[in-house]
Amino acid sequence: MARGTTGPIALPYEFDTSSIWRTILKGAFGLNALLIVGILYSLLVSRQWTTALGLVLVELIALLFTGVFVRSHEGSVGILTSDRVVIEPNVLLGIALPGPRGAYPLDHFSGVRVEFRYGPVEPDVQGGPNEVVWLVGKSGTPSIALARTDDGAGRTVGRAFGALLTLPVEEVGAPKDIQLNR
């Protein structure tokens, strides 16, 4: 299902909610690779030790941010069926990322959660309200991001998943004073 649409949801339901984080992580890894090449060039070719030292400091900061991105990414690729959800291992550029993987029976989940997120408030900045629809795991089972939506569509998508899976639906961060498109 495309972002922001509320088309019918049917099982089996294939999902990929990791694309945003894959783009962010590719950029972070690319920056790290570029800085390492710059460090090597500064040391081996131009022999500018102070430039190399400055690049090493920048690379350490970039590595810290990359580590934060790797640990805090959310999203999965998998398939939801009538009796379980199967999550593929989250791998980027041959590197295994942390996160859920494997098969989980549906009775290991307690509900569906729609998490509303506000977008930028500046008029010239792209983006807007968006939502992540989660399958909420019981104790010992991870929660799994099933869909990303825009402009309030998550409310409808979350209710559809709840009805399809006969699970309760909760809304978190739902804007009470802002009218979303429905």
Image (cartoon, rainbow, N blue to C red):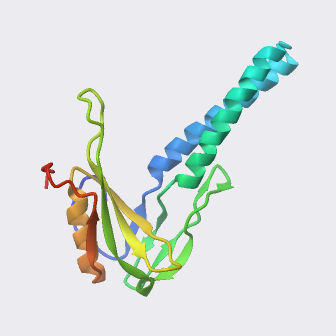
Tell me, yes or no, if residue 32 can be seen here: no
Q: Is residue 133 above or below residue 30?
A: below
From the top left corner, tell me how far across and down residue 63 is, in percent.
Answer: 67, 39
Q: In this view, does 87 lie above or below 17?
A: below
Location of residue 149 (image quadrant): bottom left
For this rendering, which residue is in front, 35 or 119?
119
Q: Which residue is drawn at 26% across and 26% down?
A: 124
Q: In what quadrant of the picture does the C terminus appear?
A: bottom left
From the top left corner, tell me how far across and down residue 174 is, in percent.
Answer: 23, 58
On the picture, is 179 further left or further right than 164?
Answer: left
From the top left corner, tell me how far across and down residue 67 is, in percent.
Answer: 63, 47
Tell me, yes or no, if residue 60 can be seen here: yes
On the picture, is 92 further left or further right than 148?
Answer: right
On the picture, is 41 further left or further right than 141?
Answer: right
On the picture, is 102 further left or further right than 74?
Answer: right
Q: Is residue 165 above or below residue 130?
A: below
Q: In what quadrant of the picture does the N terminus appear?
A: bottom left
Q: Which residue is drawn at 32% across and 72% down?
A: 112
Q: In this view, does 118 lie above or below 98?
A: above
Q: Residue at x 50, y 75 (%)?
A: 86
Location of residue 123 (image quadrant): top left
From the top left corner, tell me how far across and down residue 164 is, in percent.
Answer: 27, 79
Location of residue 127 (image quadrant): top left
Q: Which residue is drawn at 37% across and 75% down?
A: 12
For this rendering, which residue is in front, 112 or 157?
112
Q: How many labels does the image show?
A: 0
